Structures are given as C-alpha cells and as structure tokens.
C-alpha cells in the first residue's frame, strides 16, 4: 500500500492536542489528522523574543513534529497586531472605519511571512502536502514558491472574503490577491466569499473563471472552492452531559431559579455585534415587560488581542451598556444581564449551552461561527433550545432551522428573542432536528477530508509530472 503523503499544517498559532475538553474542535481535528498521516505543524510559538530563532524549535508529539519560531517585538507590532489584526481583520469584516493601512505594518507582514517560509523550507520533503491557514499567512505560499518549493499547497481562509469595493480600499490589495495565486487550492467558508474573490479576479485582475472551479490570473491557474467548516458534533454533545458540564449547569441553575437563560459566547471582538446585542436585550425588556424577572441573559466574552486599541474600546463600551441595563432593570433577586469577561472550559460552555433556552449568536460579520454549531450540538433532544442567528454569519447558510436575524436591527432581534422564549416544545424540536442534522452531517472531519481530497485532485497530474522529472533526473 502506498504511504500516505505527509501533511504539513501552517498556521499563525499551533495547537497540537487531542484533549477535546481543552482545545477547540478545529485544533483536535487537525492534530488527529496529523497523527494519522504523520506530519508537521508549523507556526508562531506565541513568544516574543529579542533575538527570534531562524531555525524552528521542534518537539515530537506522538508522530507529529511541532515546529515553532518566535517573533521580535517589531514583528509582533507590525505583522500580528499591525497588518493582520489592524488592517486585514477589520477590512475583511467590512470595518473600514477601524482599518489602519500603515505601510510599516505591511512591510512587517511580508517580512514575517518570508521569515516563516525560510524557517519551514529546510524541513519540507518532496512528497509533502502543505496546508496553510488564515489571513495571517496569505503571502506565505508565494514565499515558498520563490524558494523553488513545488509541493501541493492549499490555503483556507477562516474569515470572510470582502466584496471588491471594500477590498480595493487596501492600498496593496493587488499584491495580496496575487500572493493567493501561489496556492493550488484556495478554500472559502461560503459561496458568497468565493463569489467576492471571483469578482475581484475578473473585474480587478482581468482574470478568467472556468466552470469547473479553476481560476486564472497573474499567470497562474488555481482552484477556488467552498469548504464550510464544522465541529466535532458528537464529541461536543458528550461534553454537554459530562461531570464538569453538570457542575456548571447546577451552578447556573442555582442563580437562574427556574428563569429562562439566553446565552452568548464570543471572543470579545467588535465583529461579534456585542453592543448591538446588549441593546437588543434592553429592547426585549422594554417592549416585552413580561420578561422582567423571568429571563436572564448570560454573555461570556473572554478578552482577546488586548493590545490592539479597538479591543480596549469595545470592552469599555460593553461595561457601560451592561451597567446601564442592570442599573435600570435589576431587582433585589434578579440581575437581567450577567456579563462575564473571562473564559470557561469547553465542558463548562457545553453545560451552559444545554441549560439555556436561547443561543444568541449575532455577529455583524463572521466567516462561519462555530459557537452557533456548538449550541445546537449541546442541546437535549427532549427539550432543545432555540438558536437566534445573524444572517451575516457563514453558518446562517447551513443552519436554516435557526431564527435568522439582522444584527443591526435591534428591535428585530428583540422580537426574535421574544418568539424564541415563547416557542412551543413541538416547534423547538422540529427546528432543532433540522439544525442538528446539518451540524452532524457537515462536521469538522468532513471539512478537512473534503479540502485535502480536493487539493490532491487539483495537483495530481502535476505531481505525476514532478515525480517523473525527478526519476529522469536520477537516471542521468
Ligand atoms: C474564526 C472565524 C470561524 C469562545 N469562548 C470560549 C471558548 N470559545 C471558543 C468557542 C468556539 C471558538 O472559541 C470561537 O470560534 P468562532 O467560530 O465562534 O469564532 P472565531 O474565534 O472568530 O474564529 C470564524 C472560525 O475561525 C473557524 O473557521 O468560524 O468565523 O472568525 O469554538 O467555543 N472556548 C473556551 N472558553 C471560552 O470562554 N474553552
């Protein structure tokens, strides 16, 4: 039997673990795969050092080589906080008002992409398959190609791809999209993201789109595909009834005292629509006063990217709104909004989801949104809750059993919450059956397999030729 190709995963941060109780489904799914095929996970160590290593530090963990490099303080400011999180992240989420197009950031981004490529290249073998993840590393493949690497390379964008009208505000938009053409396969979360990419290619780069998914521009032909990411649904469902989950559930039950819970869980990020969501809850209390003393909204929002200034602002803003709502509506024995600015373990989240009558997921823009899928997976089949989901989350294209809302329409979200809180058990069960079927069917294993199968099919003829060439070279 032929030996499976070795997989090399490249992402900004590495997360090799199979402990599903601690890590997200994505980290677990990718590390399981690496263990099967053997492989390398390469990325930033998470450390900032005065003299970053040019050769990766490597650790072997059960057949997987974890290879990491550090960043310098300038790298961190320009590549990570700068171009990735202050230019690309806001821009790709349609927040032009927050985007900072400082040229030093861009230079730093290219420098780190190049340094990462130089660090990985000596570790690559001819038969490797390289799979690069997300917006931090758009230019990584091009740097590897410059060094003569011919391995199949795929890229998956976890966040949305913006419409050309938005993308072209980035002064270096053409350089960035050209770099994406170094990959053989570029994957997006939704058809909408792929369409935005294709529109750019045709209208801005003068490229051609073929019916079979191939796209030509900048002198290269690649394939652009849609691969909606999923979760490990069965595992998350099991977590929801684990001992740890039950403990958290009981603690929450004690404070709820038979009230309904609405739950939100999001990284504290301005794309997640949290101020709008808080205001929508305020409208629920104002326009549907029967919910006073009857409903508690629990919002878990652990801090991320705390050194990017816009993340400090959003935190302050939320504290203000939460204080106002609780100041106005609290009773001696009822706090309407419990806003918790820290993280919980995955089993704890699963337990809290299972207890909550409503899962409130209203990002202003989101590549997919895994929380929506996790909420569905955690529900009890006998008494499932209702998912209220933003139409601007990639997940809305799959999760049609949700109450789909416009997160900018605060009254509309309040009305949907009221509908969810009063929905009959029969209707809840019917909607949940549709939701859970989709979450189980399109899971994280299906996602990774379909991406890699497509990548192999795209490059197969080319790989055949490359092997042939090597064989010819060897007999000379
Ligand atoms: C990006 C894209 C896309 C959250 N709080 C805690 C915690 N979490 C976990 C959730 C979920 C994950 O973090 C968040 O995933 P999302 O998909 O919701 O959002 P992003 O972090 O923005 O992810 C997104 C995703 O990539 C995958 O492609 O869906 O669109 O933006 O798993 O449960 N986990 C723990 N404690 C917390 O307090 N343990």
Image (cartoon, rainbow, N blue to C red):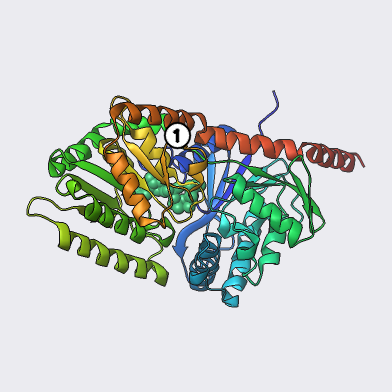
Q: How many marks?
A: 1
- Relative to 123, say whether 460 is above or below: above
Residue closest to the far front: 287
> From where the camera sits, is residue 188 visible?
yes
Relative depth, front residue between 106 and 195: 195
What residue sits right under mark 1 in the picture? Answer: 232
Left or right, 348 with reference to 290: right
Q: Residue furthest left?
A: 332
Q: Residue at x 14, y 47 (%)?
A: 293
Q: Taking 1 as reference, is 203 above or below it?
A: below
Can you see residue 14? no
Image-based side of 48 in relation to 338, left or right: right
Q: Is mark 1 within 8 Å of ligand 1?
A: no
Label 1 crowd bin: few (<14), some (14–19), many (20+), radius 10 Å: many
Q: Position of residue 261 (x, y in %)?
A: 23, 43
Q: Position of residue 35 (x, y in %)?
A: 53, 35
Quarter of the figure that contains the N terminus: top right
**Which quadrant of the structure image shows residue 43?**
bottom right
Under circle 1, the secondary element is loop
The quarter of the picture where residue 148 lies is: bottom right
Q: Residue furthest right?
A: 476
In percent of the image, x 41 and y 29: which residue is there? 234
Task: Relative to 223, say whether 269 is above or below.
Answer: below
Write down the quadrant of residue 206 in the picture.
Answer: bottom right
Q: Residue at x 17, y 44 (%)?
A: 294
In the image, residue 146 lies at what x, y percent? 75, 60
Q: Of residues 286 and 172, which is closer to you in this image?
A: 286
Would residue 75 be found to the left or right of residue 265 on screen?
A: right
> Where does the image place residue 265, in percent across and percent down from the top left?
34, 49
What is the quadrant of the C terminus in the image? top right
99 to 224, vertically: above or below: below
């Amino acid at each position: 039997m032929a030996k499976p190709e070795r997989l090399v995963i490249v992402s900004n941060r590495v997360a090799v673990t199979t402990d599903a109780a601690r890590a997200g489904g994505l980290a677990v799914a990718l590390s399981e795969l690496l263990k099967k095929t053997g492989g390398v996970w390469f990325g930033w160590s998470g450390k900032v050092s005065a003299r970053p290593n040019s050769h990766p530090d490597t650790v072997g963990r059960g057949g997987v080589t974890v290879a990491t490099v550090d960043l310098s303080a300038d790298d961190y400011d320009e590549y990570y906080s700068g171009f990735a999180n202050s230019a690309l992240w806001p821009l790709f989420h349609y927040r032009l008002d927050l985007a900072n197009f400082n040229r030093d950031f861009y230079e730093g981004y290219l420098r780190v992409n190049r340094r990462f490529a130089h660090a990985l290249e000596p570790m690559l073998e001819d038969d490797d398959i390289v799979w690069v993840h997300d917006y931090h590393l758009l230019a990584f493949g091009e740097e590897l190609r410059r060094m003569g690497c011919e391995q199949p390379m795929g890229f998956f964008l976890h966040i949305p791809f913006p419409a050309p009208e938005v993308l072209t505000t980035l002064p270096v938009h053409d350089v960035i999209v050209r770099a994406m053409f170094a990959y053989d396969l570029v994957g997006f979360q939704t058809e909408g993201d792929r369409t935005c990419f294709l529109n750019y290619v045709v209208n801005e780069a003068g490229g051609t789109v073929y019916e079979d998914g191939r796209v030509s521009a900048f002198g290269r032909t690649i394939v652009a595909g849609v691969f909606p990411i999923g979760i490990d649904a069965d595992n998350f469902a099991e977590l929801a009834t684990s001992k740890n989950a039950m403990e958290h559930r009981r603690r929450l039950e004690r404070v709820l005292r038979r009230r309904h819970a609405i739950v939100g869980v999001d990284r504290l990020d301005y794309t997640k629509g949290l101020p709008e969501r808080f205001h929508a809850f305020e409208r629920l209390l104002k326009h549907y006063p029967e919910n006073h003393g009857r409903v508690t909204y629990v919002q878990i929002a652990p801090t991320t990217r705390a050194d990017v200034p816009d993340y400090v602002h959003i935190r302050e803003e939320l504290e203000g709104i939460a204080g106002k709502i609780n100041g106005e509506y609290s009773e001696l024995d009822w706090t309407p909004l419990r806003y918790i600015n820290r993280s919980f373990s995955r089993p704890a989240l699963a337990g809290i989801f299972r207890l909550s009558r409503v899962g409130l997921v209203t990002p202003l823009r989101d590549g997919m949104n895994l929380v929506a899928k996790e909420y569905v997976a955690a529900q009890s089949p006998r008494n499932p809750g209702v998912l209220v989901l933003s139409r601007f989350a990639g997940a809305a294209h799959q999760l049609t059993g949700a109450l789909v809302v416009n997160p900018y329409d605060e009254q509309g979200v309040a009305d949907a919450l009221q509908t969810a809180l009063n929905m009959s058990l029969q209707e809840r069960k019917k909607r949940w059956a549709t939701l859970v079927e989709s979450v189980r069917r399109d899971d994280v294993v299906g996602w990774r397999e379909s991406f890699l199968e497509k990548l192999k099919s795209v490059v197969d003829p080319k790989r055949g030729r490359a092997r042939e060439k090597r064989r010819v070279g060897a007999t000379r």
